[in-house]
Amino acid sequence: MTLTRLGDYAVRAVIHLAMKNNGDLATLTDIALHETIPRSFLAKVMQGLCKVGFVKAYRGKNGGFALAVNAADITIRDVVEAVEGAIRLNICLTRKGECKRDVLCAAHPVWQEAQNALLGVLDKYTIEALAQRQKKNLSKFLNV
């Protein structure tokens, strides 16, 4: 399984929004510039995030984007699955019976354990925690 650019960019964009002060909006250009995301691709990402309700778009001269959900209530898994769909290491983990060999296959429990570990890590980190980490990283970088 490889995280696509869509998932990576969605996570970066949501973290960027979480770093804003309450009420401050971020424009598409602002996010694209600070997160080094192609603006045209970012528009697609933001549309998907708005569709699932994580982000709210505000139109007009002073418009932009803001989180629609508290950053502490969104995990990195939530964001990735919102734009990419359910995370599965192997097709046999999609649902019981998807693979006719899942009962006999010696590798099936290994795939299941690996997926559970991955999902556990992605569920452990909230966007709020990642935004705080990003602020610290930027602070260190700018003070160097």
Image (cartoon, rainbow, N blue to C red):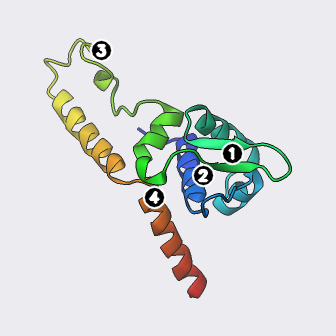
Q: Which mark is residue 42?
A: 1
Q: Mark 4 to mark 1: distance in Å? A: 21 Å
Q: Nearer the viewer, mark 3 or mark 1?
A: 1
Q: Which mark is residue 128?
A: 4
Q: Check disc 4 and report its element: helix, strand or loop.
A: helix
Q: Mark 4 to mark 3: distance in Å? A: 36 Å
Q: Residue at x 65, y 57 (%)?
A: 23
Q: In this rendering, would 141 be left or right of 122? A: right
Mark 1 surroundings: few (<14), some (14-19) or many (≥20) residues within 10 A = many
- Quadrant containing the N terminus is top left
Q: Which mark is residue 144?
A: none
Q: Residue at x 54, y 56 (%)?
A: 15
Residue under numbered circle 2 = 13
Mark 3 surroundings: few (<14), some (14-19) or many (≥20) residues within 10 A = few
Q: Amino acid at mark 1?
A: Leu
**Disc 1, disc 2: CB below 8 Å?**
yes
Q: Nearer the viewer, residue 117 or 57?
A: 57
Please tell me which of labels 2 and 3 falls first in the chain.
Answer: 2
Please tell me which of labels 3 and 1 falls first in the chain.
Answer: 1
Q: Nearer the viewer, mark 4 or mark 1?
A: 4
Q: Mark 3 to mark 1: distance in Å? A: 34 Å
Q: Quadrant of residue 104?
A: top left
Q: How far across and down, in percent of the image, does residue 11 sit?
A: 53, 49
Q: Amino acid at mark 4?
A: Glu
Q: Which mark is residue 98?
A: 3
Q: Nearer the viewer, mark 4 or mark 2?
A: 4
Q: Quadrant of residue 20?
A: bottom right
Q: In this rendering, would 7 be left or right of 30? A: left
Q: Amino acid at mark 3?
A: Glu
Residue 133 position (above or below residue 118): below
